[in-house]
Amino acid sequence: MPVTRRRLAVGGLLAAAVLLSACGPHYPLDIPEEQWLRMDADAQQQARLKQAEVDRAQAQARQQEAQARQAEAAARAAELSHARTTAGPGERVQCVLDRAELHYGGKWRRAEPLGLDLVAGMPIEFELRLQDGNYRTRTGMARFDGMEVRLCPDFTRDRCARLVATQGELRRGKSRQVTSHDFLRGRLHCELTLDPNHPDWDRRQHY
């Protein structure tokens, strides 16, 4: 057998051995097989009971973590909803990104339109989805500071698509082409708004 073929054969056998060892018997508490086989029935049963306790504790910890994440998300959603309702003039902006493209897999690809409802000083996470029917997405962060809307892959690097406008321009509605390198691009339109329940709703044309 040629050397190259022999090496490939040996490599294949080693890989198979690794896979078999990974799929081998798994004993409670990660007890090695040699030790497990030396244990009597009572000791093995005690190990099984102890493993069951560990599994229950881990499952309970995972459930508590999930509940904590859900509670945190609900609190953030409630805070954002309250901020939108009570936002004063010039503090809340609604935006639509259309003709959108997402940089995915090294290429620019058509994406679904994106709607945003932002309150000054409250960043939110958004998800931009490709229009290919495969539910491929990228997430980002959006924020508004009163004059500038930013759409960023994150807030650790300066790679944001930006729309900058005065309050007067935003009252009338401002549109522009925006681009974030290797993230997204499209036409972003933003307008200032008030919640209909806000005390200043009737005066919205005069601020």
Image (cartoon, helix red, strand yellow):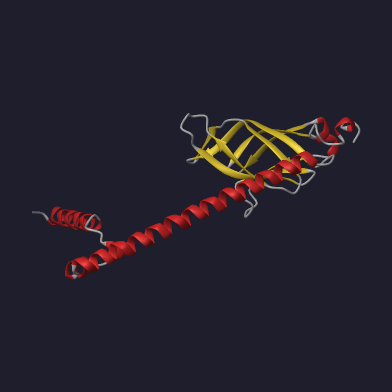
Between 136 and 117, the residue placed more toward the observer is 117
Q: In which quarter of the image is residue 9?
A: bottom left
Q: In this view, does 163 lie above or below 155?
A: above
- Residue lying at the far front of the rendered structure: 42
Tell which of 103 and 153 is nearer to you: 153
From the viewer's perspective, tell me whether residue 31 is left or right of residue 59.
left
53 left or right of 135 in image = left
Residue 160 can be seen in this image: no
Residue lying at 62% horizontally and 55% vertically, measured from the top left: 156
Q: Where is residue 137 in the image (x, y as percent from the top left)?
A: 52, 38
Vertical relation: 28 (above or below) 181: below
User: Which quadrant of the rendered structure holds the C terminus?
Assistant: top right
Residue extending farthest to the left is 1
Q: Residue at x 48, y 34 (%)?
A: 135
Q: How many marks?
A: 0
Rendering coords of residue 74 (x, y %): 62, 46
Image position, residue 127 (x, y; %)? 58, 39
State the residue at coordinates (33%, 64%): 50
Give the quadrant of residue 87. top right
Q: Can residue 133 be seen in this view?
A: yes
Residue 166 position in % (x across, y down): 83, 40
Dividing the image into 4 quarters, which one contains the N terminus? Answer: bottom left
Q: Which of 103 and 173 is in front in this view?
A: 173
